[in-house]
Image (spheres, rainbow, N blue to C red):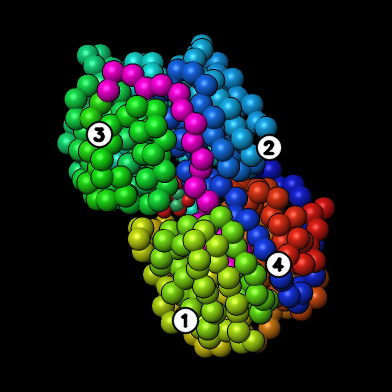
Amino acid sequence: MKGCMVVGKFVVEGGRTLQGEVRVQGSKNSTLPILAASLLCRGESVLYNCPQLTDVEASLTILRYIGCTARREGDVVIVDTGCVERNDIPSALMHRMRSSIIFLGAMIARFDRVKMSFPGGCELGPRPIDLHLNALREMGVEISEEHGELDCCITDRLHGANIALTIPSVGATENIMIAAATAEGTTIISNAAREPEITDLADYLTACGAKISGAGESTVIIDGVARLHPASHAIIPDRIVAATLMSAAAVTGSDIRFKSIIPSHLGSILPVFRECGCDIQCVGDGMSFHSPYRLRSPKLIRTMPYPGFPTDAQAPLMSVAAVADGLTVFVENMFESRYGHVSELCRLGADIRVEGRVAVVAGARRLLSARVRARDLRGAASLVVAALSARGVSEIEGIEYLERGYEDFELVLSALGAEIKKL
Ligand code: UD1
């Protein structure tokens, strides 16, 4: 990500067993679109279980730049979007996180004319936004793209449309839902993304007065309403953070308990850990996780849109495969360049070969400590997981990437008994 400076590192002494109970933070990928959607509500929305992350702070900075107020009280964020002064987002703010494109639908619905720069590429390879732009054009937005700037305006009115997505893009589905909430008429999104974060956004918008059906399914129907009102909403738990903590427990041969999770959101993740020999019992929003003395390798992990295996959990699970008994084949179907963590895992002693979108991991009994550098958010998480299992003291640089998505990760792990410090 362009806005990231290289600061901060973790020092991890591997080999400690984890124990105890952990509460999983709120979902980053729910919080970001919901903060953008709050722009349409013209008043004070209260968001509970809102994680304190650099990406969330970047969204709050954008809201403040536009003229809104935003404050945090623990894990509660209160945004007041009653007052707005600006209809642009400068490139410095757009480049702080790629997901800033999620403001486009909300801005155009609120202002009729919007200027913002392209969010640009990122560490996962090219991240096009053609689906977002084409959908908004179908809804009546004129968009000119010049010199990396987007100039968008509504000459007539923002109206509903039948939008068939060629890829079930999470961000495009969210942008369309937000823009459609107060557009004139009905919008039907086919081949919509089905991620739990889509449903969470729909729940917030519905609480604000929107009329949405089908969220979480392939066809989402939004009947535009004249205006939305502010609402309170509790963000869902972060399924990727849960998967990362399960990975940490698995590689250290640990037993831990989770609270505040939604097991159904982990539908494609739990079978992989069970294949590794982990015993997992879910009761309500709690889960006990027991890992065996020696993990078995999961045979094949193919990343897919939800409800398939999430691309965001690929990197942490690769650290699990790296210490399991046998071979694992990974196929990354979502992003072109999502194996940035592999070379660093190899420095920790992992045996991984990459060919295009395929990575083959031959599990080792034990990894070795090393000094490694994170290059992206989930890759950073995979390095922490690997270091927890490695013999000796490892240093992980580039943890500012990790802080985009994991709240106080070193404190969460320390509370479970890990030997990890942030320098
Ligand atoms: C979201 C998540 C991210 C996750 C990803 C896939 C947030 C803030 N981020 O990102 O953590 O890894 O979903 O589950 O929720 N595409 C296009 N054109 C577009 C849009 C997307 O070709 O206009 C392609 C992308 O290049 C990618 C695929 O569609 O190959 C899926 O991307 P998308 O679902 O849009 O991901 P994001 O919403 O950016």
> Horizontally, is 185 left or right of 12 in the view?
left
Decide: marks 1, 3 in contact (CB < 8 A)? Answer: no
94 in magenta: no
Residue hosting label 4: 20
Residue 251, image x and y in percent?
64, 76
Q: Quadrant of the N terminus?
A: top right
Residue hosting label 1: 275
Looking at the rendering, the stretch of residues picked out in magenta corresponds to 225-246
Secondary structure type for disc 2 = loop
**Which residue ends up furthest to the front in the rendered image?**
284
* Circle 1: residue type: Glu
Residue 249 picture quarter? bottom right
Residue 222 numbered tag = 3
The span from disc 2 to disc 4 (Cα, nearest Å) is: 23 Å
Secondary structure type for disc 4 = strand
The span from disc 4 to disc 3 (Cα, nearest Å) is: 43 Å
Decide: marks 2, 1 in contact (CB < 8 A)? Answer: no
Secondary structure type for disc 1 = helix
Q: Is residue 294 above or below residue 38?
A: below
Residue 132 picture quarter? top left
Mark closer to the chain start, 2 or 4: 4
Residue 104 visible? The answer is no
Residue 74 numbered tag = 2
User: 328 or 359: which is nearer to us?
Assistant: 328
Q: Is residue 405 above or below residue 93?
A: below
Mark 3 Cα shell of 10 Å, populated few (<14), some (14-19), many (≥20): many
The span from disc 1 to disc 3 (Cα, nearest Å) is: 40 Å
Residue 16, image x and y in percent?
76, 74
Mark closer to the chain start, 3 or 2: 2
